[in-house]
Amino acid sequence: MKRYDVTALGEILIDELKTGNDTVSNVGGAPANFARVAARMGLKSSFIGAVGDDIRGRECILALVGDSVEPLCSVKRAATTIALVTLDGSGERDFRFVRGADAMLSEADVPVSAIASSGILHIGTLSLSAEPARSATLAALKAAKEAGVPVSCDVNYREALWPSSVAAREAALSVLPEVTYLKVSGGEAKLLVGAMPPEEAAEKLSLLGPKTVAVTLGAEGAVVCSGGRTVRTAAKPVRAVDTTGAGDSFWAAFLACMVRNGAEGELSPELAQKCAEAGAVAAAECVSRPGAL
Ligand code: ADP
């Protein structure tokens, strides 16, 4: 019996969303959001990351605990990372980072036994953008491989944290052979395999390692390719208030559906459709309210 259904590793931080003269702060970081939504969907979840020895860091841990996520976190002599999020005229989000503790997660902080006792290890690629977090992420992937734990990855490309888009692309492509479940946005699919219809991109990505690939397309829904077959799901028609965390909610609900149905690796088209529907419902709930969850 595994201790956790999922263990997520990566950044936990404070999102500061600026709209007009207002700033709203929330605990964020894609893998942390993922772990919290997964727990809300009934999965036993834990989270590996690093926070600063400050009020923001304590807020981060409290948010995890409040959602019944076991915090397997290290506390660093650095400030908790902050993401400054602004919305442009069309509602698109722009990210700047005041990077601190999240990048300081080290190999020694990775609890190998917790990973070995997880049904799934979930990562993003933001933790691959700086050392020592990069080595910590690679150590976690190695631990998962050795224990036969499948890996889920949400690419979650943040331009501001990479020296170039080429470096981000190379980092993401380098881990794909270790990934069983992959989620990318339409823009990330383009970054990784070039401009093409999402169905084709999902198929192409699945040839690079992952057994199940979801390409999410915002209000246009999502495409899922698994076992060489592709399904498309519409988004739920809602009034979008704040799209922060939509992808994290989608993916946590998708994987929770998979786990509930006892599925692993390749999904039947029926199950892929059912899980993408579950993802769309959770994501619609997320975008229709302020905040990332
Ligand atoms: P990410 O947050 O990773 O960029 P997306 O923006 O593609 O991901 O959104 C993920 C999912 O969230 C979509 O597949 C869709 O189900 C839902 N979603 C996103 N934006 C909207 C929207 N405006 N209206 C309804 N659903 C949305």
Image: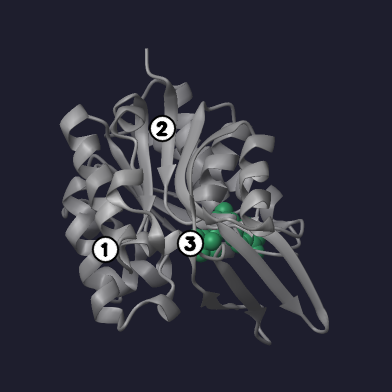
Q: Foreground mark, 2 or 1?
A: 1
Sequence order check: which comes first, mark 2 or mark 3?
3
Label 2 environment density (alpha carbons within 10 Å; few <14, some 14–19, many ≥20): few
Instruction: Give how far apart the Cα atoms at labels 2 and 1 are.
Output: 29 Å
Q: Look at the numbered discs 2 and 3 and tell me whether their residues touch, using CB distance below 8 Å.
A: no
For label 2, the residue is 270
Q: In this view, does 54 lie to the left or right of 137?
A: right
Looking at the image, in which quadrant does ligand 1 appear? bottom right
Taking the image as drawn, is residue 106 in sight?
A: yes
**At 35% from the left edge and 38% from the top edge, which residue is drawn?**
121
Element assignment for label 2:
helix
Q: Is 232 placed above or below 147 here?
A: below
The percent coordinates of residue 181 (x first, y second) are 32, 44
Label 1 environment density (alpha carbons within 10 Å; few <14, some 14–19, many ≥20): many
The percent coordinates of residue 115 (x first, y second) are 33, 32
The type of residue carrying mark 2 is: Glu
Element assignment for label 1:
helix
Instruction: Give how far apart the Cα atoms at labels 1 and 3 are.
Output: 22 Å
**At 54% from the left edge and 75% from the top edge, which residue is drawn?**
98
The type of residue carrying mark 3 is: Ala
Label 3 environment density (alpha carbons within 10 Å; few <14, some 14–19, many ≥20): many
**At 61% from the left edge and 41% from the top edge, which residue is drawn?**
64
Q: Look at the numbered discs 2 and 1 and tell me whether their residues touch, using CB distance below 8 Å.
A: no
Sequence order check: which comes first, mark 1 or mark 3?
3
For label 1, the residue is 172
The type of residue carrying mark 1 is: Ala
Q: Residue lying at the far right in this picture: please name it.
A: 21
In-front residue for pair 266/50: 50
Element assignment for label 3:
helix
